[in-house]
Amino acid sequence: MLVAALSQLVLSLLLVGNHLAEVNRSSDNNEISMKADIYNTSQVQVSNHYAETHAIFLISFGEQAADSTLVERCVLSLRRRGQWTGYIVLLTDAPPSRYEDWDEENNVIVMHPREEDFNGADGKPLEFNRETLSLKVKRFKTYVLDYVDMDKRLNKIEVIYYLDIDIIAGNKLEHLFRSKQQMIESPHQLRGGGGGGLSTLHFFTPISSEYPFQSGTFVVKRTSSRHCLELWRREIENIAGGTLGMDQAALRTIHEHIKAGFETKCRLIRMGNEDFLSFLKPKNFNKISKLSSYSTLIHLSNSKFAKWMDEEQQNTFLHAVLQLSEEEIQSGKYGKSIIKLT
């Protein structure tokens, strides 16, 4: 009987021990789950924070651009690879019917240029020649803040990233926003310690040493970029009748004026490209196309380099970056190669 009693006692202790172990494991799992939820919530909060304060700005002008799939590619990549849920502003001269279904469905704000914005500072229409005609569109980059100010949905936006429409996202935008946040938000004081701060624009580093800044991507700070944008517009207008249709040339002039001390209220700041921006060129295309992870932004550089790249490889690369399904590929909605604008 004593043996039987001891056996029963041991069995009871084992059952209690197992129960306590199960409780502990459950507690540990709950703690791990709670930590995971906190982590996920934190990530969502970070993402939501940028969505509330940041916006993407695109410009698409001309029949060729309207007939192409460049805007569709860009927006799709921002949503998929970029995981961007915030506002995308599209300034376009395409007919309203071209993007009529986008506003609600894709969180895209479609805007159209004001007639008066085609005029120069004297109120008269600007005249461009064959060499500088592209500046007619590029000049609208300097109106980013004006158009953002027009829509009350953008009232809380503090930072605007302008992107050429032949740029696609290859990775999370959050990584870019977080990494450049301190640089962009740091106040820049006027020389001599005078009252007020400097106006600033932030640019990535160009692939050519001919120009100090790459104008296909730049960052506008709502509270301080207006003066620099207006300077840029004025310099573009100054070269409208010349022989160089490069908005980078206008930036170079401003940069020279700053260095010479003629311009004291604007600062053009160059950011390192690092793993945030890559340019597709014939010499690096094979390497980039075989990667499983891409830079945050990829500049496709349609007309200049694409004709030297294998078209089928381009198709495969685009399908991979855009994460297209077979159905989407067959639909042709997002085009094929980089070579053509379609």
Image (spheres, rainbow, N blue to C red):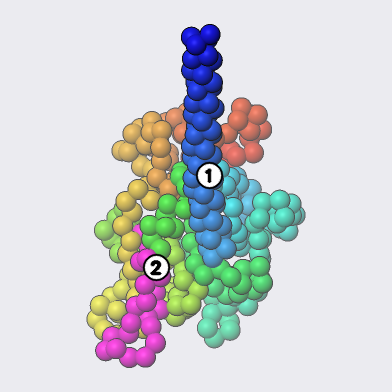
Can residue 98 be seen by looking at this rendering? no
Compared to residue 95, the image places residue 311 above or below, namely above
Q: Earlier along the polypeptide chain: callout 2 or callout 1?
A: 1
Q: Nearer the viewer, residue 342 or 79?
A: 79
Instruction: Give the structural element (helix, strand or loop) at label 1.
Output: helix
Q: Which residues are magenta?
A: 182-204
Q: Residue at x 31, y 73 (%)?
A: 255
Could you say where residue 328 lies in the image, as x and y percent from the top left? 63, 33
Tag in front: 2 or 1: 1
Q: Identity of the amino acid at label 1?
A: Met
Q: Which residue is mark 2?
A: 184
Q: Nearer the viewer, residue 120 or 42?
A: 42
The C terminus lies in which quarter of the figure? top right
Q: Identity of the amino acid at label 2?
A: Ile
Can residue 181 be seen by looking at this rendering? yes
Residue 259 inside the magenta-drawn segment = no
Q: Residue at x 54, y 80 (%)?
A: 120
Residue 193 inside the magenta-drawn segment = yes
Q: Nearer the viewer, residue 247 or 13?
A: 13
Compared to residue 340, the image places residue 214 above or below, namely below
Mark 2 and mark 1 residues within 8 Å of each other at the beta carbon: no
